[in-house]
Image (cartoon, rainbow, N blue to C red):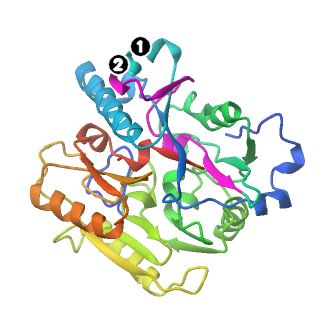
Amino acid sequence: MEKHSMDRRFFMASAFASSAVPQAFAGSDITRAFFAPHEGARHARTWMCWPSTEEIYESSLAYFEDVQETLGRLARAIAEHEPVTMLADRSLHPLARRLCGPKVELMDVATDDMWSRDSGPVFVQNARGEKAVVDFNFNGWGNKQQHDQDSNVAQAIAQRLAIKTIKSGVVGEGGGLEYDGDGTLILTESCWVNDNRNPGMSRDEIERELKKLLGVEVVIWLPGVRGRDITDGHIDGSLRIVRPGLLMMSRYPGDNTSIWAQARAEAKSVLHASRDAHGRSFEIVEIDSATAPRSDDPELFTSYANYYVGNGAVFTPAFGDNAADRAAQETLAQLYPDRRIVSLNVDRIYESGGGIHCVTQQEPV
């Protein structure tokens, strides 16, 4: 994601197969019948993970508690629009219940941290309406953070739902994937073609596997930025697919020389020269990031791109930069005219290097 410091998650722009699934299922032709629906398709629920490890947050206990309160408040807001299930060790359920409210379902699964977009599965479905999950073998963004519990999240969700697990032949995270549900995938080389996840694998090999797993026909590779943050350049903080052919891109006003600005210019150049799976060119709508936020944390991630599209609502941050917040809300309202724009003070999540999209994972109807 486009961020101007070495934070825990962003720059600009384990293998757990269900024992109930035949061995031939993984990597076989049956996976081609499945595809990943666009985030804007109707959800059955949102899956979230409870931040459970104080040591990950290099600050005070009070700050860690603020992170938990912020995530609980976000879960409550989403639960007003669709079912929400929060994974947390049973010992933490009283706290999670108090902070998340009565509408959020709690599931007894131990977690390390809150980034369910990455530790959780990517849901796929087929023409018969059957659902499955793709387990991308979460390894803590290349073994940069403890993940003993989080590496089990995808399989735990599949077992709870009693649906198939498709074992990925590559390692990666949901935050590194933007797909339109209509045959097109956008991602960064810096994240996927990286020896900390996929040692010795070429871009072509990774692309073939992702096409098979996600049911896409066209993969658009953006260069990204390698080694400057924990994710090596997740796509979902800088660019989002609003619908096929229409993209939202984050912009930092006045930044023309940083490595993030260079990556962004390279990404735009690639996108302008690309076509999606149906031959469409891309329209790009830009939203300026906040420049005068209320938080003075140097790690604050101020892009509005990391929003979450829920049932009837779009959940977006409000940074306290009145002009930027208002402009982002107005633009998102134009991009998603059929949804309510819900703006929230979730600074503690964005100070931790991620955003609303990073702590949510949709399950399609």
Amino acid at circle 1: Pro
> Where's the N terminus, which quadrant?
bottom left
Residue at 69 percent of width and 65 percent of height: 215
Which quarter of the figure has residue 279? bottom right
Q: Nearer the viewer, residue 242 or 236?
A: 242
Residue 162 is drawn in which quadrant? top right
Per the image, the residue denoted by label 2 is 98
Q: Position of residue 164 (x, y in %)?
A: 76, 43
Q: Residue at x 45, y 16 (%)?
A: 93
Question: CB under 8 Å between callouts 1 and 2?
Answer: yes
- The answer to whether residue 291 is left or right of residue 117 is left
From this view, report whether residue 68 is shown above or below residue 2.
above
Q: Residue at x 37, y 22 (%)?
A: 54
In this figure, which residue is indicated by the disc labeled 1?
94
Image quadrant in which you'd find residue 19 = top right
Q: Residue 274: percent from the left, percent from the top? A: 51, 84
Which mark is on residue 155?
none
For residue 343, side relative to residue 314 (left or right): left
Q: Which residues are magenta?
A: 99-125
Seen from the viewer's position, the closer of residues 142 and 14 is: 14
Classed neighbour count for the residue bearing mark 2: other residues with Cα under 10 Å, few (<14), some (14–19), many (≥20)? few
**Gap in angstroms between the C-alphas marked 1 and 2:** 6 Å
